[in-house]
Image: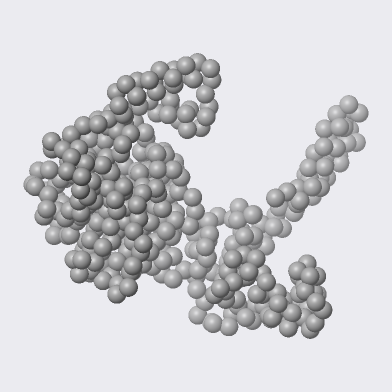
Amino acid sequence: MYGLVLEGGGAKGSYHIGVYKALKESGIEINGVVGTSIGALNGAMIVQNDYERCYELWRNITYSMVVDVDDEEIDKIIQLKLIKEDLAFLKEKIKGFIGSRGFDITPLKKLLDEYIDEDKIRKSGMDFGIVTVNLSEFRPLHMFLQDIPRGELKYYLMASAYLPVFKSERLGGKIYLDGGFYDNLPYKMLVEQGYKDLILVRTHALGLTRKLDLEGTNAIVISPSDNIGRSYEYDGNRAKTNIELGYYDGLRALNGLKGQRYYVYPKTNKDFYLDFLLKIPEEKVNNIQQMLKIPEMPYRRALFEHMVPKICSMISLDKECTYEDLLIYLLEKKAEKLDIEKFKIYSFEELLSKVVDKKIEKEKEEVSRLNKLIEKVDILPIFNREEVILDIADLIFSNEEK
């Protein structure tokens, strides 16, 4: 009996959907879902078994689907692509925003009307819970479906996601505040219902998240391995990337994949990485020894007693650093530098091969470009040679760029 916990986070909630896709493909059956804010909204669609619709909704999300704004105007503000006329227009918009005391969330209400089916949720047989804050009565609310009057679920979902920047209005006669201001990751709701197997999906968004106390549970915590944007970044392209990241991060957590930035199958041969280190030529070990200013000593002793611990410390893996952790981390750094495709599951050998091939490819491209520049020097008029010299300088110093 697995329980799914979805942390609040506005637009970051697209990450939830990728993780849920990984859960579905891994055959994990979810019996209960709790969430705060966007976690509650995503959770509702998961409970009503509308994952595909939720997935498509996120892939096409825009700002105007959440609040009453012009998407092009908002994009200019976010990207800071404003001209003088835009600034004057923005000034008037801000005045209007202050005068009306917040953003009009009519579009969000329409989304709930279109996508949330209370009957489906109530007939699902699943536990479903949300968090909000009742400002009218100054008290937080942890509510399960059975605590919500029939016909009012959409009000409470709205209440769970009600931010202070929204136009103030009453829901069911009361004023509510986003539940993230009280409990942004409400895993204890499921623990109190007897759930032991928990999957917590983080967004690390602003909000009050209680210190995790998962003793006595079999909890899997899935967190973004890369930046998932800002809570207000309702952009379809960002959402697509977040969904893919959530999917692969979910597969890593569920299937024991290795790596921090890439996804690497674990080795069944426990000595593979030790053997890999032992095969490093003495000459290369000596070069590393000099780089790290390690005193002269037999190269294998230097490698295992000094170099490995020092490199682990440099890359903040010193506490429980294994040979596997070290080698995969270093390989990931090379892969990232060479722009190797991230969203794929590799064996260590496959990723290493990709890195080697891409490195050779880049070196050939640089040599080819240099040869072309040299040819240009022979035929170019003298007044164009300054530009060519600058291009050559760029190539020579490219390896020094950080």
Q: Residue at x 53, y 27 (%)?
A: 81
Q: Quick one: 185 or 23, which is closer to the camera?
A: 185
Q: Residue at x 26, y 42 (%)?
A: 177
The reply to whether residue 187 is visible in this rendering is yes
Q: What sort of colour scheme is used for the picture?
A: one colour
Image coordinates for residue 18, horizontal then vertical, percent:
37, 54
Q: Residue at x 60, y 76 (%)?
A: 323
Locate residue 326: give its quadrant: bottom right
Locate residue 6: give its quadrant: bottom left
Left or right placement of residue 289 versus residue 384 in this view: left
Q: Is residue 21 above or below residue 149?
A: below
Q: Is residue 394 above or below residue 280?
A: above
Image coordinates for residue 401, horizontal then vertical, percent:
73, 48
Left or right placement of residue 198 versus residue 353 in this view: left
User: From this viewpoint, which residue is outermost toward the left?
Assistant: 150
Left or right placement of residue 218 versus residue 369 in this view: left
Q: How many marks?
A: 0
